[in-house]
Amino acid sequence: MKKQSPNETGWRGSSEVWLQAASEILVESGVENVKIATLAKRLSLSRTSFYWFFNDREALLTALMQRWKEKNTGNIIRQSEAYADSLAEATLNIFDCWLDNGLFDDRFEFAIRSWSLQSNDILAEVHSADQLRLDALAAMFKRYGFNDVEADVHARTIYLVQIGYISMQTQESLEVRMQRIPEYVKTFTGEYPELHELARFHFRHGYSGP
């Protein structure tokens, strides 16, 4: 028996299916290629199916931005507020974002920032997200006794280094990154993480190196 295509069965996808496809295309080839026809072809769905979930392309792009905010910005804020025994461990909680794509998608981040070079509206959204993230990191340092200026500088040091990693598309093996983590923590906070704090961090990321 011939297998029916999604179009033949009447399946139209879902808002999440269309949004995920849009996210993938944004990352792969930029916002200019996030088009309804391109999405429909990728999903083997009709173009009209798209309109069951989004009014137009602009609504889809708005949803893409919202997804980025909720995931990348939202998780940095949540990690900055997570329980920690020390400032060093609080910083390791932030580093979870840089190592766990489920918390923070660096390719998505790069794609959004590339898009912002073409749109002042998107650039404003990126600047707003940057400030929310910096405020969250500064608040973390203030909880450990840093004054406003100190907290701001330490927050910027952590954040701008990571944005540099993303912008330069720096690639490191997990082993190399883990070897550097204690020194990064010392540089950013003035203290090394305790062995048990590092052990918890390593466990979260499936690392069992030397």
Image (tube, rainbow, N blue to C red):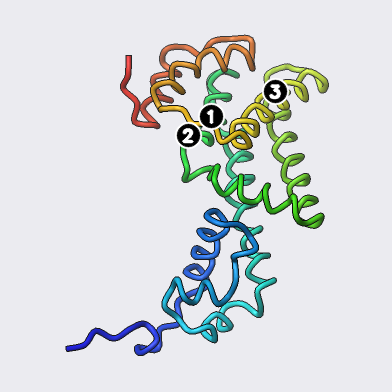
Residue 157: assigned label: 3
Say if mark 2 contacts mark 3, CB within 8 Å. Answer: no
Query: Compared to 67, does 46 lie above or below?
Result: below
The span from disc 2 to disc 3 (Cα, nearest Å) is 18 Å
Q: Secondary structure at mark 3?
A: helix
Q: Residues within 10 Å of mark 2 (few under 14, many from 20)?
A: some
Residue at numbered disc 2: 99
Q: How far from the left and from the top, in percent, is residue 125?
A: 76, 52
- The residue drawn where x is 77% and y is 25% is 152
Q: Amino acid at mark 1?
A: Phe
Where residue 46 sits: x, y (%)?
Answer: 48, 84
Above or below 93: residue 71 = below
Q: Does residue 62 appear left or right of residue 43 in this picture?
A: right
* Residue 186 position by quadrant: top right
Which image quarter is the C terminus in?
top left
Residue at 36%, 27% in the rendered image: 203
The residues bearing labels 1 and 3 have C-alpha atoms spaced at a distance of: 13 Å
- Left or right relative to 40: residue 191: right
Which residue is label 1 attached to?
Answer: 95
Question: In the image, what residue type sits under mark 2?
Answer: Leu
Residue 24 in percent (x, y) is at 50, 58
Describe the element under mark 1 as helix, strand or loop: helix
Q: Amino acid at mark 3?
A: Thr
Cα separation, mark 1 vs mark 2, equals 7 Å
Precedes in sequence: disc 2 or disc 3: 2
Residue at 43% across, 20% down: 176
